[in-house]
Structure formats: structure tokens, C-alpha cells
Image (cartoon, rainbow, N blue to C red):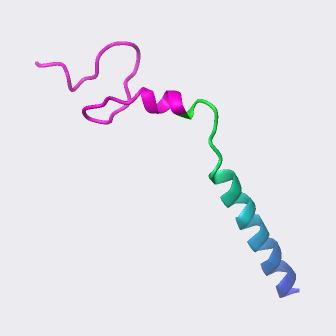
Amino acid sequence: MYFKFITLFLVGMMVLAFFGKLRFPGQKKLQNMKCPKCGRYRIGKGPCGCDKKG
């Protein structure tokens, strides 16, 4: 009984690891939305907050 439970658990972990390595659509677009200077996500089309002097 324990062997069956452990085997199913390990197979489930392998399936989760397989899906974790996949590249999801839109991931490249999300990386392009980051500010190259500070690394924060930009909201909208305007400049990042680190560029503003105030």
C-alpha cells in the first residue's frame, strides 16, 4: 500500500516538473514589459517611474 502511494506521489511530482519547464505563451511579452534600468514592470505605455525626476 505504501509503495503504491509513494509511486503515485513521485509520478505526480514528475508531471508537475515537466509542466514547470514548459514555456507558456506570452512569457516573452511579459519580459519585454520590464524596465531595463530598475527591473520593475511598466504599466501602460508611458515611461517607468524611475525615469521621472521629482
Magenta stretch: includes residue 39: yes
Locate residue 13: give its quadrant: bottom right
Determine the residue positioned at 75% across, 60% down: 15
The answer to whether 4 is drawn above or below residue 13 in the figure is: below
**Rendered location of residue 18, percent (x, y):** 70, 56
**Rendered location of residue 8, percent (x, y):** 82, 72
Secondary structure that dominates the magenta span: loop
- Looking at the image, residue 51 sits to the left or right of residue 16; the answer is left
Q: Which residues are magenta?
A: 28-54
The answer to whether 36 is drawn above or below residue 17 in the figure is: above
Determine the residue positioned at 66% across, 60% down: 17
Magenta stretch: includes residue 5: no
Q: Which residue occupies the extreme top position in the image?
A: 45
- Looking at the image, residue 51 sits to the left or right of residue 30; the answer is left
Q: Which residue occupies the extreme bottom position in the image?
A: 2
**Rendered location of residue 26, percent (x, y):** 59, 29
Q: Which residue occupies the extreme left position in the image?
A: 54
- Looking at the image, residue 40 sits to the left or right of residue 53; the answer is right
- Looking at the image, residue 39 sits to the left or right of residue 26; the answer is left
The quadrant in which the N terminus is found is bottom right
Locate residue 27: give its quadrant: top right
The answer to whether 27 is drawn above or below residue 2 in the figure is: above
Determine the residue positioned at 81% across, 77% down: 7
The answer to whether 21 is drawn above or below residue 32 in the figure is: below
**Rendered location of residue 12, percent (x, y):** 76, 65
**Picture mark count:** 0
The quadrant in which the C terminus is found is top left
Foreground residue among 38 and 53: 38
Determine the residue positioned at 18% across, 19% down: 52
